[in-house]
Structures are given as structure tokens and as C-alpha cells.
Amino acid sequence: MTGEIYLDWNATTPLHPLVARAMDAARELGWANPSSVHGAGRRARAILDDARAAVGACLGRDARDVIFTGSGTEANNLALSGPGALVTSRLEHPSVTRVAEAREATGGIVRWLPVSADGRVRADDVEAALATCSGPTTVAVAAVNHETGVLQPLAEIAAVVRRASARLHVDAVQAAGRVPAELWRFGDSVAVTAHKLRGPKGIGALGLAPGWVPAPVLRGGAQERGLRPGTQDAVAAAGFRAALERLDESAAAYVHLGAERDRLERELADRAAVNGQEAPRAPHCSSLVFPQFRSDELAAALDLEGVRVSSGSACSAGTSEPSPVITAMHGAARALATLRVSLGETTTAAEVSGFLAALRRVLGRGALP
């Protein structure tokens, strides 16, 4: 095996050349403060407005209902910033579960949904949780799980939330550009981020239902309707727009990854279990369980082989704690033995074969780096 094999696309994606060119062009024209009323500021504002319209088209929203944020994490935090009860589960990204924990710690009402072994939440359980809440209530669900790739039944959940006159927030960070929009374009608010789409880091967005105004997480100026104060980066916004303009191309590439992901799992069937295999999943992600090994040691050993994978969420990297997602599904012991492999639009069959060969070498010597 020669070169690097990058199979950690759920953590982040490489900047696409078209995105880099768009950002280079924007640096020449859009370096000024978009809030300035002079010509340079207006040029930056025009770039920002074009990007906002592109995000709105992606989310099925009017551009006026799009708020730029610094990340998907911030978009989730902003969506959950309002008062009232919160219904969610331990399957969610830390940017949701930590908000829920903080709210619970200060006396807020949080209902934790039960988690099935296949990594899904059930609409019936959402309905039961909503029946115990009064007043404003938000249900937070990720369309595609960041560790297992499991798809949540959003259509059924959305119907339950609508009947209860509650609000649904959809974390679509791992879904946009990877699975069809009809699987994730639900909710009164939807969070996305550019760097999962081969765009730049440091910019995300929250699409809102018309008329809904969340509570600001930050305090400052009037940017982003006062909901996200701070000078916007028109150059990053140009990159976001360029990434969105190739969304159909990206989604088509992900469809074809399913065959390689399935081959990978078949060839490891005698060595590894698969978390969430019984549920509908995005086509690119595999959560592999190696019962005799620690996943962090496996990831480190594979790194020395030139293969980049993950032992859990990138947002939890560097901690010794087992994945809360896999723990909720199967317990801590299995979580500590789980390796996440996420393919991307440029992943080749040869790279999957290279990963399999490297993994067999690592397993054969006991996985220690």
C-alpha cells in the first residue's frame, strides 16, 4: 500500500478544487466587512447574500430564514436556545446532548428517548415523551447518525411532533449531500455545515421556519438578524456556496459507495460485528466492532499504516470515554471496541482493499502500534 487512505469523511472532507477557486476569487473582491456601506463592503455583502440564497435553496427555505453560524455545532446550539422542554436521545451529536445536559442541570425539562439496539428512536416514544411536556417543546433528532450512519424515521417523527404542536429540530450535518433531501428536509429548524460538503471549516447555517426567532447564543451587533452577531466571512460563504452548487454531484457519488461499504463489511464478517446494520443507513458509513481489541489502539495502528479512520466522533477525540452513541445502543464494552470507517465521494475500490489489507495486518499482530 502506498500513499494515504482517508476513510474519515464523517469527521471532515477535503476541500474541493472548485470550492478553493471560488474562495480565491472571493478573496480578491469580498475581503471587506459585509456590514460596511461603502463599495467594498457592498461587494462582500453581495457574496454573502448569494451564499445565503444557495443555503436556502438547499434547505427548501427562503434566504431570509437562513442564519449563518460558525459551525454545525453552533447551529444546533442556536436552534435549541429557546425556552421550554427538550426531547432528544443519547444518539445525538454532543452539540445537542451537552445542551440537553446543561438545561437539565439548571432545572429545565428534558425527556431522554429510549434507544433501540439498531440505533433508532421510535415515533411512538417521541409521542409518549411529548405527552409528558407542556408549553413550548422542541424535539431534536439527527437525520443521519454521525457514528453509525443510521437514518432516523424523520417523516414519522415529524408527523408526531406536528400533531403535538411542538417544534422539530433536524441536525442534517451528516445528511446533506450524502442522502436524498427527502430523508432529512424536515423540521422547523435544520442545521448544516460546509466542511462536511467539501467546503471550508468555520461556517455553518441554520434554516428556520418563517416567523420563528430563537434566542441568541451570543450577544453583540445586528449581524444575522442579531441572532448570530459578529463579522461574517464572505470568503467562507463563497466556499459554502460553491460546495452547495455541486451537491447533486456529491449525492450521486455517495449512492455508489454503498457497494464498497457492503463489500468491506462482508469481507470482515468473520472478525467484526456492525452497529446499526439492521436499520436503514447512509451508504458510506460503517461502525465496526472488534470484540478483542480497543478501537483507539486499532485506529492508531492503522494510522501508522497510512490509513485514517476514527474510534468515534471527532468531537470526542482525545478522551478515554466510550462513545455515548454506541453505549446507548449496546453498552460501554462494545463502544470501546468500535471503529468508525466513513467513505467519501473520492474513495476508490482500491482504497477499500488497501484498508482491508492493512487491517488484517494490524489484527494479525495484536493491533498495538
Image (cartoon, grey):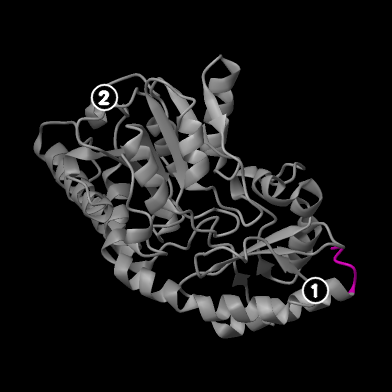
For residue 138, which quarter of the picture? top left
Q: Is residue 359 positioned above or below 164 on the image? A: below
Residue lying at 67% horizontally and 43% vertically, measured from the top left: 324
Task: Please tell me the numbered disc located at residue 107.
Answer: none
Residue 367 included in the magenta stretch of the image = yes
For label 2, the residue is: 226
Q: Which of marks 2 and 1 is nearer the N terminus?
A: 2
Residue lying at 59% horizontally and 67% vertically, measured from the top left: 7
State the image coordinates of residue 57 (x, y, percent, origin top left).
Answer: 21, 54
Residue lying at 23% horizontally and 23% vertically, measured from the top left: 222
Looking at the image, residue 134 sits to the left or right of residue 230; the answer is right
Q: Is residue 347 positioned above or below 220 on the image? A: below
State the image coordinates of residue 74 (x, y, percent, origin top left).
Answer: 43, 36
Looking at the image, residue 64 sits to the left or right of residue 266; the answer is left
Which range of residues does the magenta coloring cover? 365-369
Q: Is mark 1 on a helix, strand or loop?
A: loop
For residue 90, which quarter of the picture? top right
Looking at the image, residue 211 sits to the left or right of residue 251; the answer is left
Kind of residue sitting beneath label 1:
Arg
Q: Is residue 313 positioned above or below 106 on the image? A: below
For label 1, the residue is: 271
Q: Which of 296 and 147 is in front in this view?
A: 147
Q: Is mark 2 on a helix, strand or loop?
A: helix
Kind of residue sitting beneath label 2:
Gly
Report the magenta stretch's main SS: loop
Q: Between marks 2 and 1, how big is the CA–CA gap?
A: 53 Å
Q: Can residue 337 be seen in this view?
A: yes
